[in-house]
C-alpha cells in the first residue's frame, strides 16, 4: 500500500474516548538521576502489562464486528491486547507466534482465550504462516503496524504526555513494526511540533532504521536481539510511509545498552521492564551528555518477562533490591 492515508491527531483524540479506561492515564514517572529532566510513561501496570491494549482496543472499537474469527501474528504483547478485547466482543482469535516465543507471553495470550499456534523460527516466519492460514479460510488478518487505528490508539500515550508535561524537548520511542512511533509522532507533530521524535530500534534488528533511511521497505536476513518485541526483519510498508512524516530520527541501541536501561528502570522506579520496552530509555542513557538540561520523555512499553529472564537480567529484582 503506497498511498497509505496519513494518521490523524483528531482520531487520537477520538481514541481517548473509546479505549477501555483500564489502559489509559498510565503513571508518569520522573527522575533527577541524570543531568536532564526525565519523564517516562509507565505502560506496564495494566492487565496485559504493555501498551498494546490501547491500539488493539481502538482498532476493534472502529471495526465491523461480524462475529468472524480474527487472525494475527505476535511476539506476545500485541496478541494479548487483541485477545483481551476480542473476547469481550465474543470473537475468536487465532494468534501465530514463533516456536521460540517467550513462553510467558504465549501462556498469557492463551489465558485471554486466544488460540495460539506456534510456527516458524521467528516473528516474521510466524506472520507468514498466519497470512496463509487466514487466506485459506477467508478470515481477517490483523497486522500490527498496518492499521491506522492501531497506531492512533498508541498515540493516546503522547496525548497524555502533553497534558502532563509542558515543553517536551524530545521523546524517545521504541521502534518495532512502527505503529507506536508513528502514533506518538503523529500527535507531537500536530500538537507540539518543537518536540524532537526519536524512534529507537535494536542494533541487531535494524530493518526499520534501514527502511526509514531509504524511504522504502528493506528486509534483513535476521533479527538478533534480546528485545523480542522489536525483533523485526521484514518491515510493514504502511508504517514506513507513516514514519516519513512523524519522526525525526532513528537510532539503534545494542543489547548491553538495553540491559543497562532495564536495570536503571528497576533501580530508579522499581519497575521491571522487558527489553523492547526499555529501548527508548536505553537511547536516552546513551545520549545523556548531549541531552543535558533538556526535558526528555520516553515510554516503558512492556513488562512481560519470565522468571528466568528476571533472574538473568535483573538479579537485584530477585533479591528484592
Image (tube, helix red, strand yellow):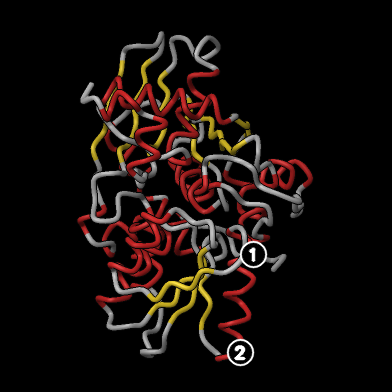
In the image, is residue 83 above or below residue 164? Answer: below
Q: Earlier in the sequence, mark 2 or mark 1?
A: 1
Mark 2 vs mark 1, foreground winner is 1
Instruction: Judge from the rendering whether residue 242 lies leftward or rightward of residue 91; answer left or right.
Output: right
Question: Quick one: quadrant of the C terminus?
Answer: top left
**What residue is pinned by disc 1?**
125
**Residue at left offset 64%, top offset 70%:** 128
**Residue at left offset 41%, top offset 89%:** 68
Q: Which mark is residue 108?
A: none
Q: Secondary structure at mark 2?
A: helix
**What residue is pinned by disc 2?**
136
Residue 244 on image: x %, y %: 66, 47
Crowding near pointer 2: few (<14 within 10 Å), some, many (20+)?
A: few
Question: Quick one: quadrant of the N terminus?
Answer: bottom right
Residue 40 on image: x %, y %: 34, 31
In the image, is residue 232 above or below residue 277? Answer: below
Amino acid at each position: 500500500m503506497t498511498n497509505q492515508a496519513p494518521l490523524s491527531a483528531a482520531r487520537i483524540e477520538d481514541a481517548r474516548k473509546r479505549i477501555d479506561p483500564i489502559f489509559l492515564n498510565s503513571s508518569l514517572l520522573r527522575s533527577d538521576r541524570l543531568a536532564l529532566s526525565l519523564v517516562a510513561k509507565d505502560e506496564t501496570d495494566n492487565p496485559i502489562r504493555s501498551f498494546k491494549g490501547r491500539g488493539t482496543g481502538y482498532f476493534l472499537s472502529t471495526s465491523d464486528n461480524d462475529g468472524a474469527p480474527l487472525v494475527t501474528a505476535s511476539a506476545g504483547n500485541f496478541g494479548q491486547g487483541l485477545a483481551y478485547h476480542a473476547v469481550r466482543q465474543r470473537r475468536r482469535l487465532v494468534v501465530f507466534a514463533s516456536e521460540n516465543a517467550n513462553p510467558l507471553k504465549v501462556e498469557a495470550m492463551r489465558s485471554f482465550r486466544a488460540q495460539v499456534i506456534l510456527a516458524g523460527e521467528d516473528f516474521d516466519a510466524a506472520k507468514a504462516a498466519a497470512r496463509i492460514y487466514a487466506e485459506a479460510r477467508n478470515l481477517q488478518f490483523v497486522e500490527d503496524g498496518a492499521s491506522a487505528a492501531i497506531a492512533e490508539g498508541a498515540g493516546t500515550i503522547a496525548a497524555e504526555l502533553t497534558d502532563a508535561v509542558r515543553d517536551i524537548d524530545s521523546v524517545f520511542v521504541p521502534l518495532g513494526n512502527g505503529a507506536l512511533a508513528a502514533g506518538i509522532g503523529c500527535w507531537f507533530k500536530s500538537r507540539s511540533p518543537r518536540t524532537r521524535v526519536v524512534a529507537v530500534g535494536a542494533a541487531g534488528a535494524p530493518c526499520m532504521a534501514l527502511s526509514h533511511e531509504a524511504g522504502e521497505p528493506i528486509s534483513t536476513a535476521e533479527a538478533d536481539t534480546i528485545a523480542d518485541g522489536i525483533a523485526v526483519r521484514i518491515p510493514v510498508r504502511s508504517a514506513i510511509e507513516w514514519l516519513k512524516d512523524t519522526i525525526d530520527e532513528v537510532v539503534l541501541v545494542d543489547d548491553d545498552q538495553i540491559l543497562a536501561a532495564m536495570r536503571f528502570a528497576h533501580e530508579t522506579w522499581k519497575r521491571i521492564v522487558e527489553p523492547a520496552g526499555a529501548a527508548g530509555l536505553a537511547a536516552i542513557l546513551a545520549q545523556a551528555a548531549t541531552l543535558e538540561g533538556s526535558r526528555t520523555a520516553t515510554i516503558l512499553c512492556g513488562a512481560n518477562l519470565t522468571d528466568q529472564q528476571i533472574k538473568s537480567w535483573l538479579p537485584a529484582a530477585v533479591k528484592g533490591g
